[in-house]
Every structure is written in C-alpha cells, then in structure tokens.
Amino acid sequence: MSAATTPPVIALKGLKKRYGMGDAEQTVLDGIDLKIERGEFIAIMGPSGCGKTSLLNILGLLDHADDGDYLLDGRSVDTISNGRRARIRSEQIGFVFQSFNLIPRLNVIDNVALPLTYKGISKTKRLLEASKILSTFHLSEREYYMPWQLSGGQSQRVAIARALVNDPSIILADEPTGNLDSRSSHVIMEELSDIHQRGNTIIMVTHNPNLTSYASRVITMLDGKIATDTKAPRQKRSKSALKRRLDAQRKTVKKPKKTTPKKSKKGAK
Amino acid sequence: MHMRLLVLYHLSCAYESLRSNRSRTILTILGVTIGIASIIVIMALSAGASRIISDQVDNLGGAVAVVRPGTTDTEPQLNNITSALAGNKTASNLTEYDLEDVVEVKGITSAAPLMIIGGDVTAGDNTPKEVSIIATTPELIDVTDLTIREGQFMDTVTSRETAVIGAQLAVDLFGTEQAAGRTFQTHGKTFTVIGILKRSNNPINYNNVDFDHAAIISLESGKLFNQNVASIQQINIRAINNEQLPSIIKQVNKKIAQNHFGEQDFTILAGSELARPASELFYAIGATLTIVAGISLLVGGIGVMNIMLVGVAERTREIGIRKALGASNSHIVWQFLLESLVMGLLGGLLGYGLGYVVAFAVARTFLTFNPVFNWEIVGMTLGIALVVGLLFGLYPAIRAARKDPIKSLRQYH
C-alpha cells in the first residue's frame, strides 16, 4: 500500500562486487537485485562465502559495490563522498555485530551514546538518550558497567541499544547470535522481533535456520546470487513471537510474586 | 557548535586513553619535556644576558653613547666578555684630542675615555692573573654604572699616583676588600689605593671591562706608560636626555671625523646597539645550543609519533567500530591528533617549568645574571610544543583515518 507512494528503503539493481585481481579475482556478489520495504525483517541465509556479509557491508556503506545501483531511501549512494557516507551511517544505519564490538575502554552508557557523538549532540542529551534506550532493554542498572563485566547476552543487548539509539532507518545485524548460547540467542531474537514490531527495518545475516522464524522474509544466497526469496506469513510469525515474548515477561513478573507468598507465609507463621 | 562539542568529546577521549596507558604516556611526555626544557634554558639565559646591558644603560637614565675605534664591520670584539679590550689587535686611533672635542659638544653632561693598558699589578708577592688596568678621567664615574664601596673616586685634585680598584682585585692583591691606603706596583710605579669599587658581579657590560678585576688609574699615568700617547679604546658619553641623543651623536660624529681627515674609522653606538657585541656572542652560543636542544626535541617528537602509531595499531578495531557507527575520517583524525596535541602541550608546560628550574640553577651556580621570563618565551614554547604534537601526530592520525573499516573490524584484539 505504502510502497506505491514512498520508495523502498533499499533498492539494489545488478549489484556486483569483486575482490582480488587477475587470476585471484573472485566475484562475491554477482548481480543482486533486491527491494526492501520499510518495516521488513529480513533474514539472509546461505553457506559461508556466498556473499552475505559483503552484501551487508555494502548496504551499511562500509564498502563500495563495483557495479550496479544502490538506492537508499530512493537516493543513489554510489557516487557520494566518504564524508557523506559516514554521515548516512551515523543517521540512517545501525549495526549489530556477531562479536558485539563494544569499545572496551568505554562503559555501557558511553558505548550506547557513541553514535550520537558523531551527530554532534551535546553530552547531557547523549547520555539521556542512551539511558532512555537502555531502560527499554532493562539494562538501566548496568549503565556504568564496563563491557567485560557483562555476559554475552547483555553485551549484545547493549550493542542493539547502541544500534537503535540514533533512530536509524535500517538495522543491519551480522549473525547477532553467533557468539551466544541458544537461550541468550532467543532473548536477542525476541528483542529484534520487538524492535521490528515497533516498525523498524531489520536485515539480519544468520547461519541458524531456527532463527528465520522471527523474520518476515527469508533470502537465501548462493555463489553471490539470490537463490530464494520467500515472504513468511508475517502476521502469524510476529504474533507468535510477540506472544512468546509476553509469556516470557509474564514469567519474570511472576517470579517476585512467588517470593511474596513466601514472605506472607513466614509472616503467618 | 558541532565542531566545538566534538573537540570537547575528543579531548575527553584523549584524556581517557592517555590515562589508561599512564606509564607509557608519562615516558612519552617526558621526552617532549626534556626537549622543551633545554630550549627554555637557552632562551631564558640568553635573554637574561642581553638584558644586563640594557639594564645598565637604563640605570644611567638611558642617554648613553659610546665611541669606539674601527668601523662596525671590523669591530666584533666578541671575545671580550670578561677580559679587557687590551687583547684587541687593532691599534686605537681615538686620542685625547678627540675626547677634548667631544666634551665641547653641547648637550653632553660628561664624557670619559677608557684607555686599557696591558701589564701586571703587584703588591708584595701577589701578581693576580686576571686584571685590567684602565686609565681614565674622573668623569668615568658619571658615565658608567659604578659605585664606590670605600674611599673615593679620582677627582681633579687627586694625585697621579692614586688608583681605584675593584673589590676582587683588592682581595687578590691584599687579601681583603678593606684596601684603602695600601699600595701596589705597575710599570715600575707605585700607586696608592684611594677607593674600592662595590662588587658588581657583572663581567658583561658595555665597557667590556670587568670592573671587579680593574685597577683604575689617571689618564696621565696611562699616557706615561704608553710613551705619552693616549690610545683610547672607548669614549663614554652621557647626554642631558634621550631626546637630544641623536643630534648629539651626529655632532660628535662630525667633530671626530674632522680630526680623522674625514675618515669614518670609528663607530658611535647608542641604545640597544650597546648590548650588541656581548649579546651577539650569546646568541651565537645560544643558536648552537638551540640546535642541540632542537635535536632532543626531535627525539621527543619521534617518541610521540612512535607511541601514537602503537596506539593506532592497538585500536584498529575501535577505529572500525567508530567508523561503522558513523565516524568520518576527519573525526578519527581529530581523535588521534588531539591525543598527540595533548601530549605535546603537557610536555610543553612541564618543560617550561623544568626549564626555568634548570635555568635558575645554572644561573645561580655558574653565572652572574638571572634568566628572563617573558611572554615571548611562553608563547614560543607552547607554540613549539603544539607544533611537535601536530607534526608528529599527523601521520599516525591520518593512518588511523585511512584504515578500512571492514578490515579493522575483522582484526582480533
């Protein structure tokens, strides 16, 4: 419906990327055509070396395509300067990495506030924004922890908070659960799903087929080309995801209830 | 606004990063500190040396000029800091007739010759090595910054065989500064000491004479020792005031030139020119030492660059993260550049402090004057420190900014 009036958030046409030279030349992306609408949650699957990460790097403006067009929010980003690319990264793109990539010298809140720094927002406002977003991830009491004091799941939630803090148009996640156990993985996927529910566009690269159930669209890649592109019945999936999340929340809410009767029992005794 | 906030942010980043590597930061800063300190020592001391003479002129009210034989080109006299003009190789062509003509010029309150005679002075068994015999007229006390500590200076009625001697010479000859009335011999004549000069501790002055080691005798006696010819190395002139000094110099010039058949074989110096011979030497020494200090500063700067390159290599992954989160190349350049600038500036400030401590220690121990503080030196030091930080931080910073974010993110740490 809205696609007719607003351009897709990402439009790729014949995108090509090669590495190396001469005999060692290797084509990692071989003519990718792709349209991504606002509010989609896309999972990109495929074997190692199929070009998933290269695609993500180009989408995130960390890398240049050798050939083809890339329109971000309807505007071509092929020929713009490095400075403008940095600007777009800071304003429109949020990155989530497999290895979290928190800066070890900075505490949690400074890490989360980092993208706002490059937008030129004052320190007080930066910290306020970062604090706000951390509270939605239930990390308020961890604001002044250092990254090494966090568990993997917490680190990744901090990283997601950092990706979201500047309210980007798209979130690019490169195997966000790759370094996490299955329980933390699902917590992270719930978070991403929740963010998606709030209307964010997410593009996620993953190896884990179980996680595609959270996505609204699954793309598989092979040898630098898109092999399959299937839209998942979005409503149902997200509903179930939301339901699971609510269940999980209910469980956590129940916990303190369990303790209160104990206390009352003690009181009764 | 945007830029200012970022500078503040990068400054706090720099502070954090420097603090987290404390010992390495301190050692790097120390390198810059030592370089800056040696420059400070040299600048403060050479400025101090050249100020001595201008202070002496100021003590006399400023309206002082001197006439010296020879032209400016042939008259460096740079070797005469502590020794007398006696070592001068060119024969003086200033005579007492020139002096007589100079005195007649209107506006001159007094003028005195300095005739420096070679030879020893002896009292008993003592023949001090370091001595200047100066033949002059009683007016010298008016045109030179001298104070009598004991007795009196020569005047028109004192006899030819009297002398005024410097405090150190009195000690060298008689073993005491209380030497009034004692006698010494020179050139086969006996002189009675009628006055002792107050110790000036000032071998650097526009007379090029160390008055602490001087024996001042009358011009008549001096002539006697020089086959009745007054060969004058310098005529000191004091004018009524500073405003008239230029016109007086012009008239003096005319008079002496007449005596010399129109030949300009003498030089008249006034104002800052008076300080020139001595300070030129000091600046020559200073320039040499500055080059040495500059080399130590260069080494300090290389230390800064080295540590910055290590820092950039260590933080490659951080650079990748920052770029992915929206940092532009210039953000990264500024982040690292401010770090090296902070190191340079801290080195500069510490070096400034250390430099003055050393300069004072050196001045108190070996020299007779104090180092000079002035804003020029402060500005120059901080400028040099910033330039060092900038120059040696720029390459690491640019290298940091040029890093490919994808490769940087892949780097394991």
Image: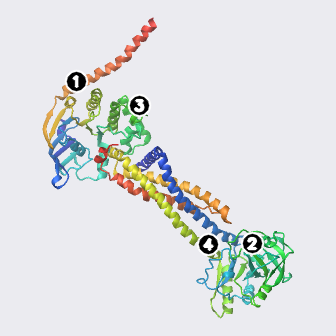
Question: Label 2 sits on what residue type?
Answer: Asp
Nearest to viewer (mark 4 / mark 2): 2
Going from the N terminus, do you reach mark 1 or mark 3 first? 3
Q: Where is residue A110 drawn, in percent x and y?
A: 41, 39
Residue ID at (75%, 72%): B212
Marks 1 and 4 share the same chain:
no
Image quadrant containing the C terminus of chain B: top left
Based on the displayed image, in which of its 4 quarters is residue A48 positioned?
top left
User: Mark 1 falls on what kind of element?
Assistant: helix
User: Mark 2 falls on what kind of element?
Assistant: helix
Relative to the observer, which residue lies in front, B167 or B66? B167
Based on the displayed image, in which of its 4 quarters is residue A122 positioned?
top left
Task: Please give the residue where the numbered disc 4 appears in the rendered image.
Answer: B279
Q: Where is residue B376 drawn, in percent x and y?
A: 56, 63
Nearest to viewer (mark 4 / mark 3): 4
Q: Residues within 10 Å of mark 3 (few under 14, many from 20)?
A: some
Q: Where is residue A259 drawn, in percent x and y?
A: 40, 14
Chain name for mark 3: A
Task: Please give the residue where the numbered disc 2 appears in the rendered image.
Answer: B212
Residue A79 seen in this snapshot:
yes
Q: How many marks?
A: 4
Q: CA distance from mark 2 to mark 3?
A: 77 Å
Nearest to viewer (mark 1 / mark 4): 4
Labelled disc at residue A240: 1
Task: Please give the residue where the numbered disc 3 appears in the rendered image.
Answer: A142
From the viewer's perspective, is residue B231 above or below residue A219? Answer: below
From the viewer's perspective, is residue B312 above or below residue A252? Answer: below
Question: Label 1 sits on what residue type?
Answer: Ser
Marks 4 and 2 share the same chain:
yes
